[in-house]
Image (cartoon, rainbow, N blue to C red):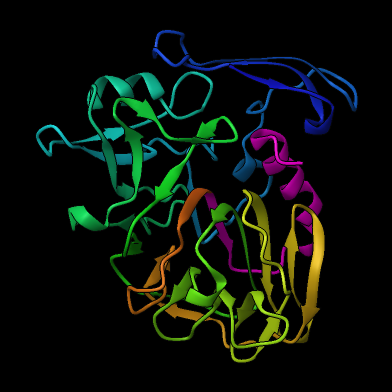
Amino acid sequence: MKRFGLNSGYIGVDRRRDEAGIAPLQKVYLERIRGGNYSPQSTLLLDLYPNAAVAYSLRKLRTSYSGSAIRVRRSSDNTEQDIGFDANNELDTTALTTFCGAGNGFISRWYDQSGNNRNVIQTTALNQPQIVNSGSIITENGDPFVSYTGINKQLKTTSSFSISSPLQVFFVAKNTRAVSDFPYYFDFQTNRAICYYANDVIPAGLSIANGTQINSGDTSLSLALFNTLFNGASSSIHKNGSLLISGNAGSNGASGILFLGTRNNNIQNITGGFQEFILYPSDQSSNRIGIENNITTYYGIP
């Protein structure tokens, strides 16, 4: 059971499935400290801030989206099944644990909730990220987590698409792989809008590039909300709402296949994983605080 306190912005109890998998998923928030009653999914993120180019999440992001969250392969017999959302617009963890039983569950498809049908997939079993381990849902900070463990875990779109500069990406993720290995959060095949940990620059650390490169020097290994804006001389990296670096990352736009959690040559993947990844084909600076507040409040990120 996850309890939230002062640093999370609200007081309450999140009654998730207990270790035995018995308790139903039910969020109960008593009061948000900043005032008023608060339901984390009363208004969905893409209803408030629409027109994303891609949107992957383990919560529902858009009221009109009628599809599933993920497609999962269970280890017992390699059968696959779509897993959707529950009445709280959260991942249906009851369906997920019932399907996987006492075994493991791996993600073969993470569905795009933007309406653009740009799902990311992985058909090779050994390269699929994991979400259930021995019958228990893998979590980070109390929420389900798409776990990239081992070598060459990756998801990617099946077809190419193009986005002109500016573009902005908000994602909740974690990496524990050494900066010296150059792990990538995301990359594109052709015009490369990339976010990765660079070790050949000073200061080494989290960097973005879209023709040129800016380097933040951040090497933190904890779960965080990252916000990367690719917009020429107005490019920037924010982490948990705070600016890490601004400067000229180029303005080439992005095109080709999107690679999630790895470089575009299918190596240099992260060790860690994701909970949410949303790419806008525009500069969302005017909406940045609202988008970040929605995400950090839901995931309890400081």
Which residue is most to the top?
A: 22
| Residue at (38, 59) in percent of width and height | 118
x, y percentage for residue 241? 79, 54
Image position of 98 (left or right of 19): left
Position of the C terminus, as image quadrant, is top right
Residue 99 drawn above or below residue 261? above
x, y percentage for residue 237? 72, 69
Image position of 146 (left or right of 5): left
Which residue is most to the left?
A: 77
Residue 28: quarter of image: top right
Image position of 14 (left or right of 79): right
Position of the N terminus, as image quadrant, is top right
Nearer to us in this view, 141 or 95: 141
| Residue at (54, 39) in percent of width and height | 62
Image position of 17 (left or right of 45): left
**Is residue 144 within the magenta segment?**
no
Residue 251 drawn above or below residue 6? below
Residue 111 drawn above or below residue 213? above
Residue 4 drawn above or below residue 8? above
| Residue at (82, 33) in percent of width and height | 7
Residue 255: quarter of image: bottom left
Image mark count? 0
Nearer to us in this view, 198 or 105: 198
Magenta stretch: give its range: 276-302
| Residue at (32, 33) in percent of width and height | 133
Nearer to us in this view, 80 or 216: 216
x, y percentage for residue 263? 41, 75
